Image: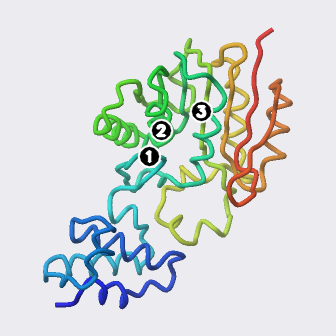
Amino acid sequence: MATIEALLNTAELPDSPTPRLDAELLLAHALGKSRSYLHTWPEREVAAEPGARFAADLTRRQAGEPVAHILGRQGFWSLELDVAAHTLIPRPDTELLVESALALIAATPAAVLDLGTGTGAIALALASERPAWQVSGVDRVAEAVALAERNRARLKLANAHFCESHWFAALAGQRYQLIVSNPPYIAAGDHHLGEGDLRFEPSSALVAGVDGLDDIRLIIEQAPAYLDSGGWLLLEHGFDQAAAVRGLLAARGFSAVQSRRDLGGHERISLGRYHHE
């Protein structure tokens, strides 16, 4: 039997940007332990069954399958979320959207909408931080809605709820103080779609027309009908799309239009405020 340290040192993941982290996550999962356990007991021998499970998971990762899919779970904000192949894996970049939303309106009662909720990551992060908010998450994929609801129930967040809707289609008559979305924003034909984790994720959650802005255009066009006067719209987009998104917001009559930069210095979030006449 090999030790924890030996298994980690011989794990080969040449195509992963984070090979050591991936190996630690997979071994901890196979052992049913935390990563801190691996660091505390590196000399412990790994029994045959978890060793075989680790080897099998390592093979899946070597084939490019995302770690989150292998584990069935992904950390986001302060939450651990179940994930599945029919939803986008929550990413650290999207935490900027949560951070920006929390800073926009007070922690007093408010109706908030998350469009294209997927795992429920954004909606549940907001609901966990703002108990006074009522957060609705919608997705066109029924399996995504069911997954988001399972995450909500496990996290015991009573101020969030989810329903099936293609963007605003099922929300007639609803008004919100804040609408957030991480919609598809990759251009069809972008070479990144054939690389890394994106190969294993649903194209419907990634691709939005020739320039990647089709869904963002639709959301910006329709959002004012669902915003209270003075309400905010926040959108995540590609690293090179901020100027185009600001232009779309301004053209639709949004004010206070601005963009926010992620930790890499890219303008990743754009937002605006809508006042009804």
Disc number for residue 125? 2
Lateral position of residue 180 relative to residue 273, left or right: left
Residue visible at 81% across and 33% down?
257
Q: Considering the image in quadrants, where does the N terminus appear?
A: bottom left
- Please tell me how many numbered marks the rendered image carries: 3
**Residue marked by disc 1:** 78
Kindly identify the amino acid type of the residue bearing the numbered disc 3: Leu
Q: Residue reaching furthest left?
A: 48
Lateral position of residue 178 relative to residue 266, left or right: left
Kindly identify the amino acid type of the residue bearing the numbered disc 2: Ala
SS at badge 2: helix
Marks 2 and 3, Cα distance to the nearest angstrom? 10 Å
Please tell me which of labels 1 and 2 falls first in the chain.
1
**Residue marked by disc 3:** 102
> Please, is residue 45 above or below residue 21 in the view?
below
Asked if the residues shown at circle 1 and circle 2 are in contact, with their CB atoms under 8 angstroms apart, the answer is yes
> Please, is residue 108 above or below residue 201 in the view?
above
Q: Depth check: 249 or 232 in front?
A: 232
Q: Quadrant of residue 187?
A: bottom right
Lateral position of residue 233 relative to residue 193, left or right: right
Marks 3 and 1, Cα distance to the nearest angstrom? 14 Å
> Which circle, 1 or 2, is nearer the viewer?
1
Q: Depth check: 57 or 106 in front?
A: 106
